[in-house]
Image (spheres, helix red, strand yellow):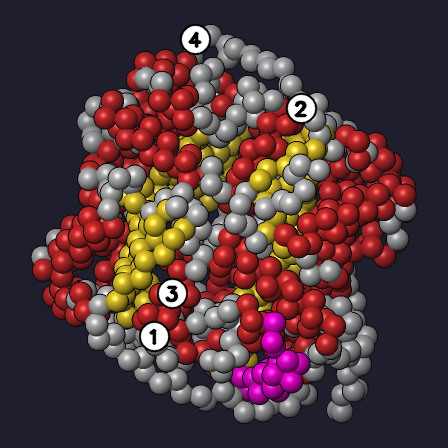
């Protein structure tokens, strides 16, 4: 059980604290409710590029990282389709340094042209490294386009193309900053060797006078159901053929969300999972196979991903995957298999609680979803799943006409 | 009471990170002589165990045997098929894997404490009664050959293979990277022979971290204390190092928008008196976000998404390298900046402010790496593997605190001579024939 204290400042900033007296370190997490789904489709990649600029100095502090490192700490951030998340890990007795830094870049950033230009280059190299050079790095561009059409989940967080990053204007970034970077649109969580009351006092001191602004209330339209099977064939220099089958799934908060996650557990969690045992080990059709959900707030995707054994065709590979998907949809899962998977999920949940950064991020994420207490209720959702649910949800998702397929062919 | 207006230009007072918790492990032996290191702690009721055998590339004699043996340990016992082992483990909700690296073969278990006894039973069975089925060996060979073919298309892998060959020679265990021909001649006899010789618990070190108690030791001894003793001392292996005479090499990889750069050399082993200082020097050069290379190549020039340098300590040798992926149009300027950064370390004293930042960062980083039993296990394993004991940690912290600009410069002059560095670039290179 993760215990936490929670408060809200007058300007709307939400603060959550989890105390862990066994450590002398603290983790600080600041989540902003803005992700790539809030971008304009003709100017994608802005939110992520902006994340880079958050490290380039703020109104009163010319360099973000130096003082933090001087305090023995380290920082990083990530952006996804739903939100942008910044975090620090540092000795708990230097906690105030993190508050000073995070509050100043929430108050006002020192956005300048030449720093933006350098970070554009950095992000373009990131795009090259992760989406062009990395094997199958463009899969998310391709799958996103096929599954989502005009929905803002269609493009990956880094942006739909390099040109969008090149063309970014300071004004666009300033717009994002003014619109979304303020206390009412942020969640601050602190975990580790800290005292909740002291954290609240510090938060009030450093964040209390920042003007509140208006929380992001943009409603993202529902993704339209895929109506016809789509398949794309692409070359790869990765030296192996690969296949991706993807399906839209319900949003977080939908009663079936955890059931879909559990279905991918049946397929691919653990060494004894079905895809691994049947398709990789017994039939030797794949050298690697996995199934997972993207787990986002809006309608995410369920993906089955495999690397083909030499000599296996994409058609054979797809048929073999489909036969496993149909098995989940048509045959009731045994009590024993269900119990095995629940043990596995429990173990994952417990191990997740050994990382302060993980706890602080999850508290913020559940708070964003509407209820931080959910951090302690994950297991209940999995335990509540019955075998009939699995059949119903799997039959609904695993339909050929709802599938978007990507075949990679080695050169 | 009205509060004073906040002066945001004024940084809060910083306390030097000095509350580092130096782990100590409770040491014990099992009846067969296996050394046990118990590292208690943590908030969750979980346990992590690593059983380390002298069963890596260093001891294998024949290439690829160590990796195949570790893989096949999980692929069937006289009582259970591979699938049944997997079912049993997943049924417990525990993780168990076997893997081999350069110097070691390892069994790694993690699970909830309530699964520990069942986990140890299974580990006992895997270690004592492995079947090494021919059919699984054949599958392993096929899969490894394909994996190798895939790796051979990857620029970063090609560069790193060439780099280790240049440092150690391709016959040295630290230079070996696997060949199809070596995989194809593996036999069950090779595996059995290696297993019989090396998977002896008398030679093993067992690290246990998490919610451990006196009972944990009893359980370990019950399931692992009476099997696989060794009756002779562990032999010593020695391999001559044949570094390449050519210090600069290039690999053409068509159709790449980026180039890989690797620059580095062998350095004194972890036990050497200069090693802690070299670690600190490495951090200044490229060991963290505020390092010279990161600031220059990424934050000032935008040549790369990431550049870093690091020290790798193996049991019998250590090396250091700088690694980055840069846009191919900036390959030459990026290399120039890397060598300039090295030269600056030799020619200029680091400022007091930068030195303070570096050492504070490193002390904080040490706190992070010592935080919680699972991190402590990793740290402990590293030092024990290199023949060091727990006093290494406070000594290392003292070296950080006492580091001077002059000492860093001396180390840079002594160890970062440009003529001593090896360099590999891989990518779509235009000047190969120049």
Query: Where does the magenta region start and end?
Result: A166-185
The answer to whether residue A311 is left or right of residue A128 is left
Q: CA distance from mark 2 to mark 1?
A: 53 Å
The local secondary structure at tag 2 comes to loop
Q: Which residue is mark 2?
A: B244
Q: Which is nearer the eye, B269 or B429?
A: B429
Q: Which residue is mark 3?
A: A142
Q: CA distance from mark 4 to mark 2?
A: 40 Å
Pinpoint the chain carrying mark 2: B
Q: Which residue is mark 4?
A: B231
Confirm whether circles 4 and 3 share one chain: no
State if disc 3 and disc 2 touch (CB < 8 Å).
no
Confirm whether circles 4 and 1 share one chain: no
The local secondary structure at tag 1 comes to helix
Q: CA distance from mark 2 to mark 3?
A: 44 Å
Number of other residues with Cα within 10 Å of mark 3, as a class: few under 14, some 14 to 19, many 20 or more:
some
In the displayed structure, B44 sits above or below B133; it is: below
Q: Which residue is mark 1?
A: A148
């Amino acid at each position: 059980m993760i215990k936490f204290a929670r408060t809200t400042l007058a300007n709307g900033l939400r603060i959550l604290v989890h105390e862990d007296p066994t450590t002398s370190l603290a983790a600080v997490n600041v989540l902003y409710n803005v992700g790539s789904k809030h971008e304009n489709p003709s100017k994608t990649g802005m939110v992520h590029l902006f994340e880079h600029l958050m490290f380039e100095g703020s109104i009163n502090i010319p360099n973000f990282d130096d003082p933090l490192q001087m305090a023995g700490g380290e920082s990083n951030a990530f952006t996804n389709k739903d939100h942008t998340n910044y975090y620090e890990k540092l000795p708990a007795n230097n906690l105030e340094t993190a508050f000073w830094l995070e509050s100043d870049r929430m108050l006002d950033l020192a956005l300048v042209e030449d720093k933006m230009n350098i970070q554009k280059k950095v992000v373009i190299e990131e795009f090259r490294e992760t989406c062009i050079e990395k094997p199958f790095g463009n899969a998310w561009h391709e799958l996103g386009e096929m599954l989502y059409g005009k929905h803002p989940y269609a493009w990956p967080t880094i942006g739909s193309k390099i040109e969008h990053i090149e063309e970014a204007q300071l004004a666009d970034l300033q717009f994002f900053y003014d619109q979304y970077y303020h206390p009412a649109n942020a969640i601050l969580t602190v975990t580790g060797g800290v005292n909740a009351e002291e954290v609240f006092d510090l938060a009030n001191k450093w964040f209390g006078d920042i003007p509140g602004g208006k929380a992001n209330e943009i409603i993202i339209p529902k993704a339209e159901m895929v109506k016809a099977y789509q398949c794309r064939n692409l070359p790869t220099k990765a030296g192996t053929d690969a296949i991706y089958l993807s399906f839209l799934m319900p949003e977080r908060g939908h009663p079936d969300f955890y059931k879909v996650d559990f279905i991918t557990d049946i397929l691919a969690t653990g060494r004894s999972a079905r895809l691994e045992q049947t398709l990789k080990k017994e039939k030797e059709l794949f050298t690697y196979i996995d199934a997972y959900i993207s787990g986002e707030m809006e309608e995410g995707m369920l993906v089955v991903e495999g690397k083909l054994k030499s000599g296996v065709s994409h058609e054979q590979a797809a048929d073999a995957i489909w036969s496993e998907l149909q098995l989940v949809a048509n045959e009731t899962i045994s009590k024993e298999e269900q119990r095995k998977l629940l043990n596995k999920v429990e173990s994952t949940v417990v191990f997740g609680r050994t990382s302060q950064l993980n706890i602080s991020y999850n508290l913020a994420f559940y708070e964003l979803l509407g209820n931080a207490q959910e951090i302690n209720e994950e297991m209940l959702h999995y335990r509540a799943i019955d075998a009939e649910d699995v059949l119903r949800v799997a039959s609904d998702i695993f339909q050929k006409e709802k599938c978007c397929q990507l075949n990679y062919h080695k050169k | 009471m009205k509060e004073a207006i906040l002066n945001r230009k004024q940084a809060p007072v910083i306390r030097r990170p000095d509350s580092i918790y130096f782990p100590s492990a409770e040491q014990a032996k099992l009846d067969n002589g296996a050394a046990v290191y118990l590292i208690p702690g943590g908030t969750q009721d979980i346990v992590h165990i690593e059983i380390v055998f002298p069963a890596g590339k260093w001891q294998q004699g024949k290439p690829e045997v160590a990796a195949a043996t570790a893989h096949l340990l999980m692929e069937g016992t006289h009582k259970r098929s591979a699938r049944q082992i997997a079912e049993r483990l997943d049924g417990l909700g525990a993780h168990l894997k076997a893997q081999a690296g350069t110097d070691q073969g390892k069994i790694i278990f993690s699970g909830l404490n309530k699964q520990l006894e069942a986990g140890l039973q299974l580990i006992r069975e895997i270690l004592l009664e492995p079947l090494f089925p021919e059919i699984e060996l054949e599958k392993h060979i096929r899969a490894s050959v394909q994996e190798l073919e895939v790796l051979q298309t990857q620029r970063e892998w090609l560069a790193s293979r060439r780099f280790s060959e240049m440092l150690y020679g391709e016959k040295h265990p630290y230079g070996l990277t696997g060949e199809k021909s070596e995989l194809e001649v593996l036999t069950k006899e090779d595996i059995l022979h290696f297993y019989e010789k090396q998977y002896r618990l008398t030679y093993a070190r067992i690290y246990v971290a998490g919610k451990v108690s006196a009972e944990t030791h009893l359980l370990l001894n019950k399931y692992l204390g009476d099997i696989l003793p060794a009756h002779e001392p562990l032999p010593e292996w020695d391999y001559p190092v044949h570094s390449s005479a050519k210090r600069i090499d290039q690999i053409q990889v068509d159709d790449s928008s980026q180039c890989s750069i690797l620059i580095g050399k062998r350095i004194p082993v972890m036990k050497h008196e200069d090693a802690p200082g070299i670690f600190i020097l490495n951090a200044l050069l490229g060991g963290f976000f505020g390092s010279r290379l990161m600031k220059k190549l990424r934050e000032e020039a935008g040549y790369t998404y990431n550049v870093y340098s690091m020290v790798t300590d193996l049991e019998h040798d250590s090396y250091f390298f700088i690694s980055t992926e840069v846009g191919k149009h900036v390959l030459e300027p990026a290399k120039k900046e890397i060598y300039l950064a090295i030269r600056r370390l030799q020619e200029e004293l680091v400022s007091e402010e930068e030195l303070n930042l570096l050492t504070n960062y490193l002390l904080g980083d040490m706190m992070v790496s010592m935080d919680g039993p699972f991190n402590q296990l990793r740290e402990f394993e590293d030092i024990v593997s290199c023949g060091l004991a727990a006093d290494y940690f406070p000594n290392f912290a003292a070296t950080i605190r006492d580091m001077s600009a002059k000492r860093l410069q001396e180390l840079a002059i002594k160890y970062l001579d440009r003529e001593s560095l090896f360099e590999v670039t891989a990518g779509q290179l235009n000047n190969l024939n120049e």
